[in-house]
Image (tube, helix red, strand yellow):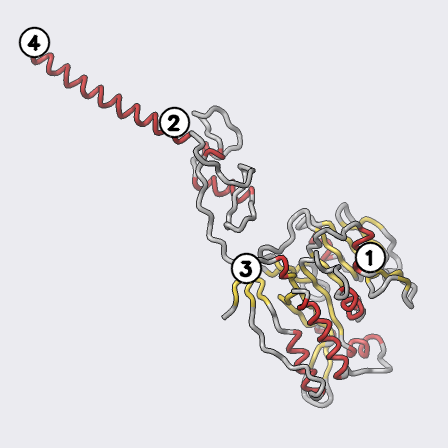
Amino acid sequence: MSGFWNVSMQSKKKIGLFSCVAFLIIVIYIFRLIPWRSYNHHGNVFEYDEYGDGDYDERARINHARKHVPKWNYTKENIGIFIRPRHDWMPTPKPTKFVPQIVVKKNEELSFSPSLPLPKIEENFYKFLEQKDVICKQDKRLGFQHDGGYNVCFSPPFGLKKPCLVYSFGIGNDWNFDDAVSKIYGCRDLAFDPSLKDLKNHNRSNLITFQKIGLGGRNGINSKGWKMKTLSQHLKDEGHTKSIIDYLKFDVEYTEWKILANILSDNSLDNVKQIGFEMHTPEFLAKFKNKNNPKHATVDDYLKMVKLLKGLEKKNFRKFNHRRNPFCEYHVTYAVKTYFSCYELHYVNMNFVTSNYTIVEN
C-alpha cells in the first residue's frame, strides 16, 4: 500500500512540474503578443526606415518583415491575436546602417586672372568644366545614351520618386529623356520648344504636356518670332512658384548664358533640386551658325562664362557630371590641342542635403 502511495506521489510531482512549465510557456507567449512598444514612431505601421535616414519605405518594411518574422506573421490582416498577431506588435528591427552616397570632392583652385594669356585661360576653362564637385554614386543617364540624354543623380536625398516634377526646355524632336522620366519614374514632365514648326501645344501622354514657348533671359518675342519666358515666369504661369522641381533641363543653343544670368538674379532656382543643361562657347556659333564669320572665344568671353558658372556654386549647386559633345570638336591654331565647344553639365542643389548624406573626400 505504501509503495502504491509513493508511486502516486511521484506521478503527482511530475504532473505538477509539467503543469508549471506549460503555464510558464503560455504566459511568455501571451506577453509577446502585448504591444509594449510600437513598430516605429512614424505613425504608419506598414513603413520601415530601412537606412535609418528618416525616409520611410513601405516596401522595404514588408521585405524586412518577410526575412525576419514567421511566414504567418507578415500579412496586413489581423485575424485574432492568438492566430495572427499584427505587424505593429512586433518589436522594431535594427535599421541597416545608412551609407552616404554623395562624396564631396576637394578640387584644384584654377586661376582666371584677366592678366593670364588666352591659351592658359582657355586651358583652365576646360579643366574647370571637367571638375566634379561631388561624386554621385547612383548616377544614371536617362534618354539617349549619347547626345540628347541627361544624367540624373539618384543618391539620397536626390532621385525621381513619384510624384516628381520635371521641366524640360529644348526638345528638338528627341523625346527620349521626357519619355524616360514619365514612363519609368512616373514624373509629370512639362516640355517646351518654340522651334518645332510642325508641332502644336498638346499632351504627349497623361504625364507629358508640350507648349510652343521658349526659355529666355527675358519675357517677350525674340528676333525669330518665338514667344519666350523667363524661368520665374514659367513657374508662375504653371502654378509652381513654391513647388519642388526635381529636375530642370535646358538645351537652348547658346542662349543658356542669358538664361543663367537671369535665373541667378532671382530666386527661381531655390526649389530646383537638379539641373542639366548644355553649354556652348563662341566656337559653337562659328561651326554651326556663322560659318562665314568664325569667332574664337576671347579672354573676356571665358571670364564671363566662368563667372556665370561660379554663380551656380554661390547658389550651392555642385557639379556631379559632365559630358563632351563629340560633334563640337575644334582645334586651336596656337597649340596642338583639341577642345569641345559643347558640354553637358549636371548639378545638384546641396541646399537639400544634410551632412549625414555626404562623405568629405580626404
Q: Looking at the picture, how far across and down is residue 85, in whole percent?
A: 46, 29
Cα distance between the residues tagged 4 and 3: 83 Å
Q: Which mark is residue 30?
A: 2
Which of pointers 2 and 4 lies earlier in the amino acid sequence? Answer: 4
In the image, taking residue 253 as reference, residue 71 lies left or right, namely: left
Vertical relation: 259 (above or below) 73: below
Which of pointers 1 and 4 lies earlier in the amino acid sequence? Answer: 4
In the image, taking residue 279 as reference, residue 100 lies left or right, namely: left
In the image, taking residue 17 as reference, residue 38 lies left or right, namely: right
Toward the bottom, the furthest residue is 334
Q: Nearer the viewer, mark 4 or mark 3?
A: 3
Please name the residue shown 34% across and 25% down the image.
26
Residue position marked by numbered label 3 in the rendering: 355
Give, as a three-letter code, the residue at label 2. Answer: Ile
Which of pointers 1 and 2 lies earlier in the amino acid sequence? Answer: 2
Q: Looking at the picture, how far across and down is residue 23, in whole percent?
A: 30, 23
SS at mark 2 in the image = helix
Which of pointers 1 and 3 lies earlier in the amino acid sequence? Answer: 1
Residue position marked by numbered label 4 in the rendering: 1
Query: Quarter of the image holding residue 310?
Result: bottom right
Q: Which mark is residue 353?
A: none
Query: Quarter of the image holding residue 228?
Result: bottom right
Cα distance between the residues tagged 2 and 3: 44 Å
Please name the residue shown 53% across and 51% down the image.
53
SS at mark 4 in the image = loop
Give, as a three-letter code, the residue at label 4. Answer: Met
Q: Nearer the viewer, mark 2 or mark 3?
A: 3
Cα distance between the residues tagged 1 and 3: 33 Å
Residue position marked by numbered label 1 in the rendering: 233
Give, as a three-letter code, the residue at label 1. Answer: Gln
Give, as a three-letter code, the residue at label 3. Answer: Ser
Cα distance between the residues tagged 1 and 4: 106 Å
